[in-house]
Image (cartoon, rainbow, N blue to C red):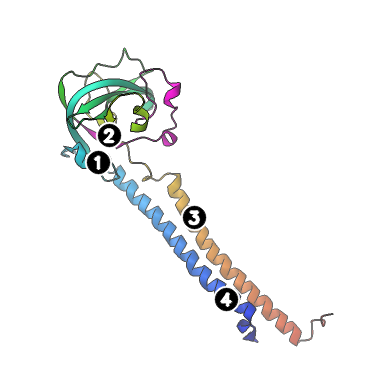
């Protein structure tokens, strides 16, 4: 009765199932692994840095990745151009960052967020940067992305304001070679509020992470669907053979 499983038609069906099931299991396991990696990265990014963390030279922490983002970096130089970054929220209040370009001894400049102030961005409110040579220690941050920040482009901002803290945005505003990173001072002066270090992008429990989890479920559903369809075809074939043996089927025209 089961000899039909050896026919060419069923050989094709069986080979397809034998290949589809492990492939779907592999893809589901891979997507689950991606989700678990993002969970681990989220835990690492959310873990507080030790209070006695020692600052490392800026160049030694570049390029910024999930292990160096938020680390204390130190550098020295002289402050130059100052810009304001509007529409930045802190503790539920709207305000702006005070960002100053630090021209380092390496010849490159690094954007330094010296602090946050409430209200609309106003150059009169922003304290002037220190003059002369200074040593700066701050939490290292990767360049922002306009899509993830949801901020407007620099073309729609008044002069002296910046929407996205990134070398690509600053290159048209200042005449320096720039680091593709920025620092946020954790002990600002002049009444400014420190800007906390942000978690690196693509490491948290964001939409992409839950997409990976959703894809995991889809691949395992595909496995169940393939097995269900095979079993359904198998039962229908058996019923057809039994009906033919019992004489319940009319002869084909």
Q: Secondary structure at mark 1?
A: loop
Query: Alpha carbon of mark 1 to alpha carbon of mark 4: how far?
Result: 53 Å
Q: Residue 62 bears which disc, if any?
A: 1
Identify the residue under disc 2.
179
Q: Nearer the N terminus, badge 2 or badge 3? A: 2
Query: Alpha carbon of mark 2 to alpha carbon of mark 3: how far?
Result: 37 Å
Disc 4 packing (10 Å; few <14; some 14–19; many ≥20): some
Q: Nearer the N terminus, badge 3 or badge 1? A: 1
| Residue 14 drawn at (x, y percent) | 57, 76
- Work out which residue is located at the far right of the displayed protein and give it: 253
Q: Are marks 2 and 3 in contact (CB under 8 Å)?
A: no
Q: Residue 215 bears which disc, if any?
A: 3
Q: Is residue 91 visible in the rendered structure shown here?
A: no
Quarter-of-image position of residue 117: top left
Q: Secondary structure at mark 4?
A: helix
Disc 2 packing (10 Å; few <14; some 14–19; many ≥20): some
Query: Alpha carbon of mark 4 to alpha carbon of mark 2: how far?
Result: 58 Å
Q: Nearer the viewer, mark 2 or mark 3?
A: 2
């Amino acid at each position: 009765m089961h000899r039909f499983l050896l026919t060419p038609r069923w050989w094709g069906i069986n080979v397809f199932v034998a290949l589809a099931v492990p492939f779907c299991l592999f893809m589901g396991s891979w997507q689950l692994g991606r989700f678990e990696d993002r969970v681990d990265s989220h835990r690492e990014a959310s873990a507080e840095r030790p209070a006695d963390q020692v600052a490392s030279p800026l160049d030694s922490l570049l390029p910024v990745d999930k292990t160096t983002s938020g680390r204390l970096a130190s550098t020295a130089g002289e402050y130059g151009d100052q810009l304001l970054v509007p529409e930045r929220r802190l503790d539920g209040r709207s305000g702006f960052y005070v960002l100053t370009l630090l021209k380092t001894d390496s010849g490159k400049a690094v954007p330094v967020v010296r602090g946050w102030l409430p209200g609309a961005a106003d150059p009169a409110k922003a304290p002037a940067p220190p003059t002369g040579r200074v040593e700066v220690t701050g939490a290292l941050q990767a360049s922002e992305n306009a899509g993830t920040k949801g901020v407007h482009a620099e073309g729609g901002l008044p002069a002296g304001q910046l929407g996205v803290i990134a070398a690509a945005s600053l290159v048209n505003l200042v005449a320096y070679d720039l680091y593709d990173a920025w620092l946020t001072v954790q002990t600002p002066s002049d009444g400014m509020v420190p800007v906390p270090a942000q978690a690196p992008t693509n490491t948290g429990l964001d939409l992409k992470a839950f997409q990976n989890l959703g894809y995991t479920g889809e691949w395992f559903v595909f496995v169940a669907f393939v097995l269900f369809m095979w079993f359904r075809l198998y039962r229908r074939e058996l019923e057809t053979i039994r009906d033919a043996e019992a004489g319940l089927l009319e002869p084909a025209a």
